[in-house]
């Protein structure tokens, strides 16, 4: 069983930061036998990072006993992370989650729905190269994340959001996407301005940071009855039927073309309608990395609107999956109403 009792890394000026280590490249080492990068225990490595001693906050660390590659992340891990933050929420001023880059944007998105109205920074970060490699980006990413998690003004957190810090950019978590696997600038948020740009100084983009007024609320349940279907020219009826007419899915995310367009053939529309009539929610988001769904702009999307497909506007796939997993567990509101709201800064509404 994983032990989530924090250990002290260093004492400091009284601002308290909790680092949650999950795994990912940042903390990996090269296994000579397997000839691959493998997750590694992080406690000792972190203690050897002398730069941390020059940072003002007091830093504590909790670690998953068996660190993992982020390809192994699932809904249980989202819930575990939200649970750790909930348990320690009142003891820390900010949280830094060290996470693999591959699914970091999915985790950030899910957490932004599981932790509603955060008043403290929850910064996810990782690296393209392990911390032990001389040219690593891990040091800068980790140190800046800690600084951002600890940053306060007028006794309040400067960035009280779930966000991703990577390579000089602070991004809203549920707007970010991994776009690059070889260069250091792995993340971008095409549809939302950066929350901060980091060079010699940290320039916060105050106008675009979300300052929630309501009470912070933690949720502890997610649904796995979600499926994602990417459209492509030539998609078969059978594939569409498998997604729309099965017992185990209640929410289908359709990755459509351009501004939300899809085939207008009767078999396509009829199958979607059958799925919707049987109680499934069908959400329309675009395959494009920028721009948004505008159902009705073209005749090919008007039919989707007519049968009750929900517009995902400019949401990323990562945000749509998190919102759907969370939304399907709500019994107080319909999915249609949930997707019509901007709950955590994930969507631009007209
Ligand atoms: N496969 C790694 C992971 O996501 C990649 C990384 O951390 O950059 O865990």
Image (cartoon, helix red, strand yellow):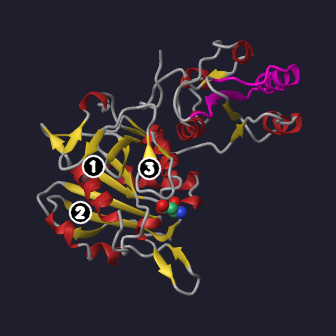
Q: CA distance from mark 2 to mark 1?
A: 15 Å
Instruction: Say whether residue 282 is magenta.
Output: yes
**Residue at disc 3, secondary structure:** helix
In the picture, residue 28 is in which quadrant? bottom left
Q: CA distance from mark 1 to mark 3?
A: 14 Å
Image disc number at residue 121:
none
Q: Look at the picture and state if 29 lies above or below 115.
A: below
Instruction: Say whether residue 94 is magenta.
Output: no
**Residue at disc 1, secondary structure:** helix
Q: Position of residue 284 (x, y in %)?
A: 65, 27
Q: Look at the picture and state if 322 lies above or below 69.
A: above
334 horizontally vs 172: left or right: right
In the picture, residue 18 is in which quadrant? bottom left
In this view, the mark in front (1 or 3): 3
Q: Residue under circle 2?
A: 59
Q: Residue under circle 3?
A: 82
Q: CA distance from mark 3 to mark 2?
A: 19 Å
User: Magenta part of the protein: which range?
Assistant: 260-288
Image disc number at residue 90:
1
Label 2 lies in ligand 1 vicinity (Cβ under 8 Å): no
Q: Earlier in the sequence, mark 2 or mark 1?
A: 2
Residue ID at (25%, 53%): 91
């Amino acid at each position: 069983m994983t032990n989530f009792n924090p250990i002290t890394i260093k004492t400091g000026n009284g601002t308290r930061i909790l680092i949650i280590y999950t795994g990912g490249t940042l903390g990996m080492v090269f296994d000579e036998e397997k000839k691959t990068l493998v997750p590694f225990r992080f406690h000792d490595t972190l203690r050897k990072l002398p730069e941390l001693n020059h940072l003002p906050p007091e830093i504590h660390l909790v670690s998953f006993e068996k660190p993992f590659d982020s390809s192994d992340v699932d809904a249980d891990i989202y819930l575990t992370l939200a649970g750790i933050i909930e348990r320690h929420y009142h003891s820390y001023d900010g949280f830094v989650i060290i996470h693999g880059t591959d699914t970091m944007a999915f985790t950030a998105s899910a957490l932004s729905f599981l932790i509603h109205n955060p008043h403290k920074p929850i910064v996810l970060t990782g690296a393209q190269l392990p911390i032990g490699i001389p040219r690593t980006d891990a040091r800068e990413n980790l140190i800046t994340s800690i600084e951002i998690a600890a940053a306060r003004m007028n006794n309040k957190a400067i960035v009280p959001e779930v966000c991703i810090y990577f390579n000089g950019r602070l991004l809203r978590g549920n707007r970010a996407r991994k776009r690059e696997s070889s260069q250091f600038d792995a993340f971008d948020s095409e549809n939302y301005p950066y929350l901060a740009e980091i060079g010699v100084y940290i320039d916060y983009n105050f106008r675009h940071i979300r300052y929630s007024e309501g009470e912070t609320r933690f949720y502890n349940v997610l649904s796995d009855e979600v499926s994602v279907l990417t459209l492509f020219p030539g998609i078969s009826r059978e594939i569409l039927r498998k997604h729309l007419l099965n017992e185990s899915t209640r929410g289908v995310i359709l990755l459509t073309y351009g501004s939300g367009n899809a085939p207008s053939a009767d078999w396509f529309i009829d199958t979607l309608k059958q799925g919707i009539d049987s109680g499934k929610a069908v959400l329309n988001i675009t395959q494009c990395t920028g721009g948004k769904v505008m159902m009705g702009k073209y005749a090919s999307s008007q039919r989707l609107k007519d049968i009750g497909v929900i517009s995902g506007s400019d949401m990323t796939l990562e945000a749509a999956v998190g919102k759907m997993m969370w939304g399907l567990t709500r019994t107080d509101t319909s999915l249609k109403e949930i997707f019509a709201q901007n709950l955590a800064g994930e969507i631009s509404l007209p």
